[in-house]
Image (cartoon, helix red, strand yellow):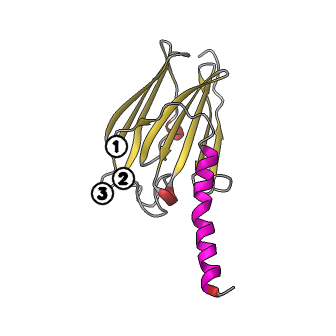
Amino acid sequence: MTYSVQLRLKVLGILTVPFLMLASASTQPIGHLHKVIADGSTHLSLGHPNVQVTLQTAKVPNDFFYKNALFWGAETGFLPPNLVRALRVREDSQELFVPLSAYSDLGDIHRASLRPSPHGFILSLYGGETATGYVAALRFANGYLVSRAVSSDEFPQSAREETRYSFPKGN
């Protein structure tokens, strides 16, 4: 086999891996995808449980203080075009506490979905482009944020973060 044929096969293999991962990821139920407004508020709701989510995004100014910070949805050393400014979650008539650390490093979000889970619901945020693409899943159960998992679209097993939350009950 010539070098150019080997190189073509390697490139083809690299290009097909993301498509295979997308195909396998698409078999997971993700709920209805909603387009996220790049500089403004996006509202999502779920009937059972009765959940209302407001996601506020804002464009990143050129003089942004944290220029060298690492953000999901941006190349290392660069800023994403927008960031999540606020995330409000209500279940029934109660506002749920969502710490800033659960969303402050998520940039360039394009789509969002809500779906029920056995003890609550999952808010999924889809951001970035190609190499910077990611999915962030915020899991809520029994009236609390219990975990956040963020993974790269291209390398979901190696480029990922997982956080578990524990809050005092009854306060």
Mark 1 vs mark 3: in front: 1
The kind of residue tagged 2 is: Pro
Earlier-in-chain disc, 2 versus 1: 1
Front residue of 2/105: it is 2
Could you tell me if residue 70 is visible in this image? no
> Dot 1 corresponds to which residue?
38
Please tell me whether mark 3 sits on a helix, a strand or a loop: loop
Residue 88: x and y in percent read 44, 27
Question: Going 44% across and 48% down the picture, which residue do you hit?
Answer: 107
Question: Going 47% across and 36% down the picture, which residue do you hit?
Answer: 112
**Marks 2 and 1 close (CB-CB < 8 Å):** yes
The correct choice, above or below, for 148 with respect to 145 in the image is: below
> Which range is magenta?
4-25
Please tell me whether mark 1 sits on a helix, a strand or a loop: loop
Residue 51: x and y in percent read 50, 20
Earlier-in-chain disc, 1 versus 3: 1
Disc number placed over residue 62 in the picture, else none: 3
Disc number placed over residue 81 in the picture, else none: 2
Question: Going 64% across and 23% down the picture, which residue do you hit?
Answer: 168
**Marks 1 and 3 close (CB-CB < 8 Å):** no
Whole-number angstrom distance, CA of label 1 to CA of label 3: 16 Å
Magenta region, main secondary structure: helix
The kind of residue tagged 3 is: Asn
Front residue of 66/161: it is 161
Crowding around mark 2 (Cα neighbors within 10 Å: few <14, some 14 to 19, many 20+) is some
Mark 3 vs mark 2: in front: 2
